[in-house]
Structures are given as C-alpha cells and as structure tokens.
Amino acid sequence: MTPDPGGPGPGPVLAIDIGGTKLAVGLVEPGGRIAAYDRVETPNEPDLDAEVLWRTLEALLDKVLADSGAPSIAGVGVGCGGPMTWPAGEVSPLNIPAWRDFPLRDRLRARHPGLPVRVHNDAVCVAVAEHWRGAGRGRGNMLGMVVSTGVGGGLILGGRLIDGARGNAGHIGHVIVDPDGPPCGCGGRGCLEAIARGPALAAWAREQGWRPGRSETTAKDLADDAARGHPIATTALRRAGRALGIALASATHLCDLEVIAIGGGLSQAGPLLFDPLEEALRVHARMDYAREVRVVPAALGQPAGLIGAAALVFAGDRYWNAD
C-alpha cells in the first residue's frame, strides 16, 4: 500500500460519509464548520454494479467541489459503514451489497494524488467528531456511540483514537449483555446490537403485540408511541436502555472512561432511553472510578460523520495511527 503523504495541505478537507441510505459530501474547515454540503440517496437496486455506485459518488464529489469554486483541499477523509480492511480502506458495507472489497481508498488517492486520504468506520468518525468538536471535547477518555440501524462506536484513550489490531476497537455493539438473549447477525447471541439496534427493537415490540401486522414500522414509530405512553413501546425502550447500561458499565470498568456520548436515531428518544440506561449503569458500575462516568447525548447531530472524517486529516496526530 502506498504510504500516506502525511499532514494536511491548505484549505478545507473533502469529507465523505457513506451509508446505506445516503452518500454525503462536505467541505469541512479546520474549526469543524461545514462550508459546503450535498447528498444523494445511495442507489440500492438489487443488481447494482460497483462501478455505477462509484460513479455516483464521483459525481457528487465533483458537484460539491464545483459549486464551491473548486478550492484547493487539504486532503480527503471518509467514514464508511463496515466491515472494511483497515487501514487499506477496502470496504464491504453490510448495507451496500454492490461494494465487496471495493478499493475505496485507492480510488480516492487516484483522484487526489499527493494528498492524505484516510478512511475509517463511520461510527469511529462520529466518535472522533464528538471528541474533537463535540460532547467529549477537552476530555481524554471517552467512548462515542451510534445507536441506530446498528450499534457501533469508537474509543478515545489518553486523548488519542484507539484502533486495535484491525481498526475495530470501540465496537461496543458486540459486547454480550445477555448470554441467553436473541441471536445476533454476527453469529453470536445476546450482543448489545441484537437487542438495542432499531430494527431489532421494533421487531421485538411487534412480537409483544405493538402495531401487529405492520412490519414497516420503525424504531422512530416505537419512540413516538412510547412518548405517548404506549406500554409495549415504553417497555421496549426500557429494554434497550437496560442493555446499553449493562454494556457501558463493562466498557467503563475496562477503559476507565470519563464521558460516553451517544448519538444515532434511537438516542432521540431522550429520557425514555437514557433513564433506564442510567439506572442499569449505576447498578452495574460499582467501582469507585466507574461511578464518575457521564453519559450524554452526542452534540453534533447529523453532520458528525463528516466532521469526524475531516478530523482524520486535520488532527491526524490524534486520530490517524496508520501509515
């Protein structure tokens, strides 16, 4: 693999956020402000070709650069759903079947020769953003989480991103919270993701009699019904909150965390999720140092993935440990 050129050049970072529902591109300034932005829906035809998807992304990149006057950029940062080969940036997002071992980083390097191009997991980028410019700013030790279609995260210790052997450190979605719990898509059983991810949570509630026969219902519908006092919806969110609290107690004992920032669609449920989370966390986080941890909503919202992708370039001394 070609070594990364190193530090950023002048100008903004061309930041990319790749997910199953959207492709988003922004120009992010050194302070974290998004100076230009556009997005398109991710093509999802069953027989979609990998090159068609790549050309869709290229067209979006060209449009954002052209609309902003084609500025000189400092580098390219990318958050993409996993799994991926890291740091090579060959991506196989579960929710984008067209890309399997797609050489995303090499393709972007060919487009932008001589500039740093850095690709990481999208949940890691959210965690990096929250540490760089959000809820974890000024703290040395934090876990950033996304609770949405899946459950992922990124880990900051000693003020630096911790990658692990293959770039997956902080992937809290596969911490076991109930050994006898439901099967998980990873092949295990009782993972946090199997209980707390949005689609699994809505499916569990339907099994209990919530909105029977309506398979199109989502976790947002569930949260809306819980806010109106629906007993099954409320119980479902309590179940997810409890699972999150148990997982976070384990993570805090293991990593001696100061802050845990939680984002993603399900976090918008507010106290309906966070109250049972806090209850379970305080029951299980019994060591004195673990009792100090604070769990807070993520501060940056939807743009966090782009901001974190830019930080891989602008603050590579803290958030990029490869090459």
Image: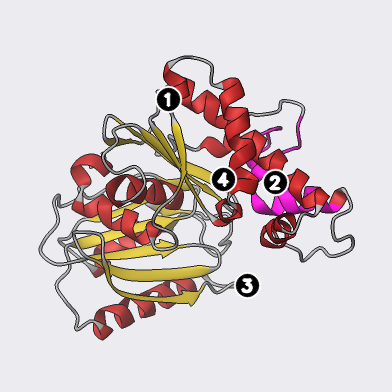
At label 3, counting other C-alpha atoms closer than 10 Å, the crowd grade (few under 14, some 14-19, many 20 or more) is few
SS category of the residue bearing label 4 = strand
The span shown in magenta is 181-206
**Which quarter of the rendering shows the C terminus?**
top left
- From the viewer's perspective, is 4 left or right of 101? left
Q: What label sits on residue 47 in the rendered view?
A: 3
State whether residue 256 is above or below residue 319: above
Q: What label sits on residue 151 in the rendered view?
A: 4
Q: Name the N-terminal-most of marks 1 and 2.
A: 2
* Front label number (4 vs 1): 1
The residue under the point 89% across, 53% down is 209
- Spatial CA distance of label 4 from label 3 is 27 Å
At label 1, counting other C-alpha atoms closer than 10 Å, the crowd grade (few under 14, some 14-19, many 20 or more) is some
Q: Name the N-terminal-most of marks 3 and 1.
A: 3
Is residue 175 visible in the rendered image? The answer is: no
Q: Are marks 2 and 4 in contact (CB under 8 Å)?
A: no
Q: What label sits on residue 292 in the rendered view?
A: 1
- From the viewer's perspective, is 195 left or right of 29? right
- Spatial CA distance of label 2 from label 4 is 15 Å
Q: Nearer the viewer, residue 26 or 261?
A: 261
Q: Which residue is mark 2?
A: 237
Q: Are marks 2 and 3 in contact (CB under 8 Å)?
A: no
SS category of the residue bearing label 1 = helix
Q: Amino acid at mark 2?
A: Leu
Render colour scheme: secondary structure
